[in-house]
Image (cartoon, rainbow, N blue to C red):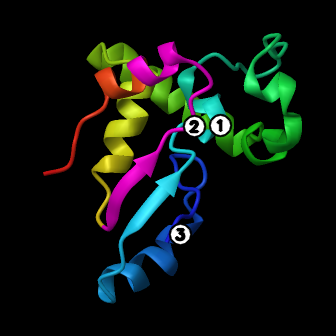
C-alpha cells in the first residue's frame, strides 16, 4: 500500500494500517512532511512564501491549512524547541516509528531537501 500519512493526515490508522499489519502487507507512505507543511515554513494567518509548494501547487491547502493542521504544527513547534530537533527530524522520526510503516517516500524538490531528509531521519531496523 502507498497511502498519504503524516502527523496531520492520519486517516489510515483507523482501518487500513491495522488491516495491512494483520495481513502482513507493507505500507510505504508518502507525504510524511504534509507537502512541506510540517517543515515549519508555513504559519497561520501569514502569507505563503513565494515559490514554495503551496504557492506553486495550492491544491493541498484545504487538507493542511486548517485549524487541526495548525494545532499539529504548534505542537511540533513546541517539541522542536524542547528537543532542539528540526521539524523535519521530528516528523520523519515519528512516521518511521509507527507500527506497520515499512518506509516513506519523500517528495523533494531540490537536493537540499533530500540532504535534510536523509541527514535528519532515522532508519528502521
Select label 3 or label 2 by which is in front.
2
| Displayed quadrant of residue 21 | bottom left
Q: Secondary structure at mark 3?
A: helix
User: For mark 2, what is the residue?
Assistant: 107
- Crowd rating for badge 2 (residues with CA inside 10 Å; few <14, some 14–19, many 20+): some
Q: Residues within 10 Å of mark 1 (few under 14, many from 20)?
A: many
Check residue 108 for magenta coloring: yes
Q: Magenta residues, as a range?
A: 100-115
Position above or below: 123 against 87: below
Horizontal and vertical percent for residue 44? 75, 22
Tell me what residue is drawn at x 42 percent, y 49 percent: 104
Q: Are marks 1 and 2 in contact (CB under 8 Å)?
A: yes
Element carrying mark 2: loop
For image coordinates 31% across by 31% down, the residue present is 121
Of labels 1 and 2, earlier in sequence is 1
Label 1 secondary element: helix
Q: Is residue 53 above or below residue 5?
A: above
CA–CA distance in space, label 3 to label 1: 17 Å
Which of 16 and 79 lies nearest the eye of the viewer?
A: 16
Residue 79 magenta: no
Residue at numbered disc 1 = 35
Amino acid at each position: 500500500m502507498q497511502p498519504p500519512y503524516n502527523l496531520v493526515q492520519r486517516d489510515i490508522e483507523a482501518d487500513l494500517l491495522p488491516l495491512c499489519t494483520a495481513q502482513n502487507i507493507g505500507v510505504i507512505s508518502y507525504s510524511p512532511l504534509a507537502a512541506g507543511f510540517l517543515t515549519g515554513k508555513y504559519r497561520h494567518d501569514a502569507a505563503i512564501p513565494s515559490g514554495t509548494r503551496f504557492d506553486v501547487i495550492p491544491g493541498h491547502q484545504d487538507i493542511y491549512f486548517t485549524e487541526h493542521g495548525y494545532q499539529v504544527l504548534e505542537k511540533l513547534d513546541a517539541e522542536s524547541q524542547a528537543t532542539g530537533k528540526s521539524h523535519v527530524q521530528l516528523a520523519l522520526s515519528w512516521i518511521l516509528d509507527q507500527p506497520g510503516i515499512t518506509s516513506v517516500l519523500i517528495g523533494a524538490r531540490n537536493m537540499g531537501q533530500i540532504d535534510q531528509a536523509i541527514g535528519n531521519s532515522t532508519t528502521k531496523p
